[in-house]
Image: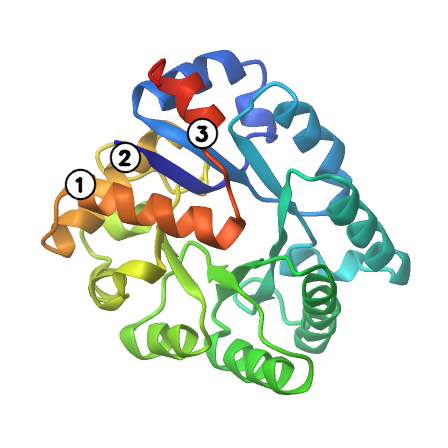
Amino acid sequence: MKLIDTHVHLNFDVFGGELTSLSTRWREAEVIHLVHSCVEPGEFESILAIANQIPELSFAVGLHPLDAHKWQPQMATEIWDKASSEPRVVAIGEIGLDFYKADNIQQQKEVLWSQLEIAHQLDKPIIIHCRDAAAELRDLLELFWTQQGRLQGVMHCWGGNKEETQWFLELGLYISFSGIVTFKKATTVQESAQIVPANRLLVETDCPFLAPVPKRGKRNEPAFVRYVAECVAELRNTSLETLAEQTTENACKLFKLSLKTEALTSNGKG
């Protein structure tokens, strides 16, 4: 079995000095690849340093919507340069809208649009963060699709209802579920996990946040993506092996990943 954790933040201080033990555990859990997201371009060097130690790591570069107030015109050039010069950058992100913790609505939309343009010009998928902004995000993406062209991407750590899920599926996006889907009271997310077509489904940890049941309340880590996959498989009445195979195939397609080397590294088999 092969699993891909499509959203991690291993450069956070909470993981300091533990990369070797973390990687041992995720390899034992049959996680063969990870996609490291980026909160702001200033993280790029710390993420690159991790990627230089972990062959099964790809990553993204972008500015999180809650950091939209940090945007400067030269940041677009910085993101472009980093994304175009490093082959392990497989996406622009995480980008999006978050009206739960911030009210700079227009600024967030402008920053998102600028990064969508970079993704479109570089033909990179987008990793989208969306909280309390589904309708506004849908409208903005529909406008961009019409004016500039369509993009591939993923709604990461998805927490929306079935109607909102359908909006983003119709825009051609993938939907990724995190540990939230394992929470007992997360019935809305669980219902959404049941309607996503198999070829648009992804799993993630968003570690160090949102550890899944049975690790809830602890620091999250990539090995725990297996619990997410198990829960989603149960919700969809399929086997863990089938779900792992499909979500791995989906991640490879979206992020244009080649896993031959990583598979050999992680399980010792040809």
Q: Earlier in the sequence, mark 1 or mark 3?
A: 1
Contact? badges 2 and 3 (CB < 8 Å)? no
Question: Depth check: 15 or 32 in front?
Answer: 32
Q: Is there a contact, CB below 8 Å, between mark 2 and mark 1? A: yes
Residue 219 in sight = no
Name above or below for residue 103 compared with residue 48: below
Q: Amino acid at mark 1?
A: Leu
Q: Residue at x 38, y 42 (%)?
A: 210
Query: Residue reaching furthest right?
Result: 74
The quadrant where residue 192 appears = bottom left
Report the residue marked by disc 3: 260
Residue picked out by circle 2: 226
- What is the number of the mark on residue 143? none
Determine whether 62 is above or below 133 in the image.
above
Instruction: Measure how far apart labels 1 and 3 are at the Cα level.
Output: 21 Å
Q: Three-letter amino acid code at disc 3? A: Lys
Amino acid of disc 2:
Arg
Q: Is residue 138 left or right of residue 198?
A: right
Q: Nearer the viewer, mark 2 or mark 1?
A: 1
Q: CA distance from mark 2 to mark 3?
A: 21 Å
Q: Quadrant for residue 44, please give it.
A: top right
Q: Residues within 10 Å of mark 3 (few under 14, many from 20)?
A: few
Earlier along the polypeptide chain: callout 2 or callout 1? Answer: 2
Give the vertical position of 253 relative to 195 (above or below).
above
Q: Residues within 10 Å of mark 2 (few under 14, many from 20)?
A: many
**Residue lying at 65% horizontally and 47% vertically, measured from the top left:** 39
Mark 1 vs 3: CB contact within 8 A: no
Residue at 24% of width from left, 37% of height from top?
227
Secondary structure under tag 3 reads helix
Quickly name the residue at label 1.
240
